[in-house]
Every structure is written in structure tokens, then in C-alpha cells.
Image: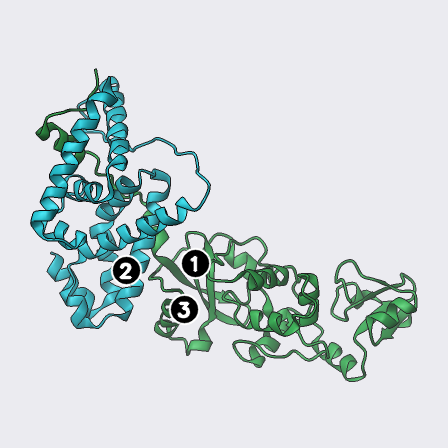
Amino acid sequence: MTDDLSQRLSVDLEAAFPDVVAAYQHAVFTTALRMSGQPEDAADMAAEAFLRAYIALRGYSPDRIVQLQLRPWLLTIVLNLLRNEARAASRRPAQLRLESSAPLDDGREGPEEQAQRHDGQARLGDLLTELAAPQRTAVVLRHVVGLPYVELAAVMGCPEGTAKSHVARGLQRLRAMIPEETR
Amino acid sequence: MSVLPTDDDALTEELARLTAPAPSHLADAVFARWVEVDGPVGALYVAFTDRGINYVCPTRWVGDDPDRFLDHYRSRFGRPLRRTTRAPAGLAGALRAGRGTGMRYDLRSVGEFDRAVLAKTLEIPAGEVRPYAWIAREIGHPAAVRAAGSALGRNPVPILIPCHRVVRSDGTTGNYAFGPQIKVDLLRAEQANLEETRALGRRGVHYLASDTTRVFCYPSCTHARRITATHRVELANAAAATRAGYRACRHCRPG
């Protein structure tokens, strides 16, 4: 599907770009949300990433567009935006952070379990933001977004083996954080 | 008590549940929409984002070719566009009345000075004109007359933000991004007294006053146009008007 989309994008950017947004908006949004931990900004950040991508694509030759691995490329853009945003935010006075997370309804849980799960997810989402940057990136992209290691390595700009150890260390760190958090 | 797991499989399962569907407004924040609508002097292409209208172009300016309009838009704003049949609420009425004040505009691409110029221009009523110097003075930069003119030349939402109502101090209509003829056509369509203003200007008359109310106006002001011939006083400049004991009209604020 990816290859086909890159192909169509290289032939007619305007016609294919809506399909790029449709295909990858959940991955880009989830990355923005889970990397930043800020639900109120995640949609803006994801939209901005797609606009940056669009402007870049307008300047690329068809040959270059065909070669693009769209998903890791888009995720790299949103991660760069988040990094720049974090840098800018560190120069601004601290803002109050709201804790919230969209509940997922699988239709089987009672309201109490849902509330508990919602609470657990919000907590897990917050724990993720406490991981060091490479581990957070690795865990979010591998286990939340569901990226294969080859794409994770492309996004992180490192060999697959290194990407794997970032994931492993990130999970280990998360596990270590959980018991104290839940007492 | 807690649902947070500590074993690996359960942990990765919980992590997978943190996937969040993109909200529906995400795509609206990426794609602008565009429509073709009837304008005062021919059809218009109008583009708008989730925040408001951000581009207006007379169809005849691009040879009635929407692709040329779309190209202009994409290179100017770096944003993809989708066609829609639903114009922003109130657009037809705003165009008919020549009153763009109630519409929402997305002026993120516009700098602070230009934005002040455009906001001021939005106040000029249909059928009236103001000199470039008026805009500059009203926004607190009286010396920036030329800069105000440049800002108006870059107006991304002409007609709705009526930069065609800003003219030269000598009474001539001056330049327009889409050519001087469209500017004249627009002003005629809203019954501005162009010919009279121009004729007065040729005789060095730039203000009109009433000797009963003792108020002076720009010649296109709705109050100036109500002064009967017998009470009408012609004036060359605001200083002379003030010296003669006239006060500036509060509607058109001549200076």
C-alpha cells in the first residue's frame, strides 16, 4: 500500500495527498499525543506535520517522492516538530498540564472497569512522557503506533539492533516505574 | 487494585491500547476548502480554512481557470485545497451588502502591520472611500502611507476586506492588485461618487463641509453627500477647515 501511495503521490501530488492524510493521520496523531502527553496540542501538531510534509513534497522531484517511505518520513517530521516545540516551551513559563486521555470503548467493559482502565491508560500515558527521549520514541513508535523495527530504525536514524535495545530498555524502565506509581 | 501491569506481554498490550484515533477536525486543519461564488463584479474563487476565509480571487483575473487559482493558492499558502459546495455562512450576504465585517478571516499569513491596515480597511462602508493617508493615520503610523498602500496591495481577501475603497489623496482611484479597472467597476457597483470626487480633486477640493452643521467630511462620506448645494462649502485641506471653525466628521474622520 505504501509503495502504491508513493507512486501515486509522485504522479499527482494534489490528487494523492488526501489519501496520505487519511492513511497516516492516526499514526501521526498518536505519535504527537503520546510523545507530548498533551492532548490539547496533539491535533494541531499533527496538522502542522502534514502541512510541512505537503510543502516539502511540492519541492521534491517525482523520483524522490517514489523513493519515500511515507510512514517513517511523516513520523520523523512530527518528531522534529515536537522537539522544536519542547525546546521553545522550555524557554516559556511553565503551563498547567491537564491530565486526560480519550477512552477506548471495546463494548465489553462495565463503566467501573472502563473508568479504571481509563485511569490506568492516562497513568501509563503520563509514565511514557517520563522516559528519556530515545526510549520514549522507541516504545511509542514500536508498541503504541506499532511500527516494524526496520521503520523504527529509519525514524531513529540508527541500526535495527540499537532500536531494539532502546525499546527493551524503555520497557524495563516503564516496568520499574509502575510498582511505585500504583501503591 | 490498579490496572497497570508489570509483566511484559500485558504491558505491551496496554501500550497498544494507547493508540488514539485522529479527531475529525485534524483533516480540516490541514486542507483548505474552496468555492466559486457570485461577487459584485463577476464570480469569485474563495478559499477558507477551519479558521476563516484566507484568499479571494476574481475568476476573470485567472482567465476563469480554477487550476490557476489553485496554483496561486498552494504556492502562496503552502496548503492543500479541496473543493466544496458549501460556502462559509453569511458569505453571499456579505458580498451582496459590501460588508465583510461579520465574516471570519484567517490572516495567519499576514504580518502585524498589514493586519492592522486590513482591520482598519474593513471599517470603510460600501460606497465610501478613504485616502491611503487616512489608513496610515488611523492605525497610528501617519508617516507609513506608502507601506499602507503596499499592505493593501498584498490583501489576500480583497472585496471582502474592501481595499478597493482606499484611494489616492488627490481623488483618483489609484492602483489595484487586479488592475485599476476592476477597482473602478467595484466602486461604481456600490454607487460611490467617483466622478464627483475626481472632479473636485481636479479643482483642489478634498473636503466638503456644511455651513449649518459646521462639520467637514471626505466628499464620499454619506454625510457629505446629504449636504444641499446651497449649504455646501468646498475646502482644500483639513487645516483650513479647522481654521474656518469646522469640526471633523465623526463618521469619516477626515484629517
Q: Are marks 2 and 3 in contact (CB under 8 Å)?
A: no
Query: Is residue A105 shown to the viewer in this render?
Result: yes
- Tag 1's secondary structure? strand
For the C terminus of chain A, give its image quadrant.
top left
Toward the bottom, the furthest residue is: B202
Mark 1 and mark 3 on one chain:
yes
Front tag of 1 and 2: 2
- Tag 2's secondary structure? helix
Please name the residue that numbered disc 2 is placed on: A53
Q: What residue type is labelled 3?
A: Arg
The chain ID associated with circle 2 is A
The percent coordinates of residue B255 (x first, y second) are 78, 67
For residue A123, the mark is none
Q: Residue at x 31, y 38 (%)?
A: A37
The tint of chain A in the picture is: cyan
Q: How far apart are marks 1 and 3 (CA)?
A: 14 Å
Mark 1 and mark 2 on one chain:
no
Q: Which residue is drawn at 14% across and 55% down?
A: A154
Residue B79, picture quadrant = bottom left
- Mark 2, residues whose alpha carbon is within 10 Å: few (<14), some, or many (≥20)? some
- Tag 3's secondary structure? helix
Residue B115, picture quadrant = bottom right
Q: Output the letter for the chain in green.
A: B
For residue B76, the mark is 3
Please name the residue that numbered disc 1 is placed on: B48
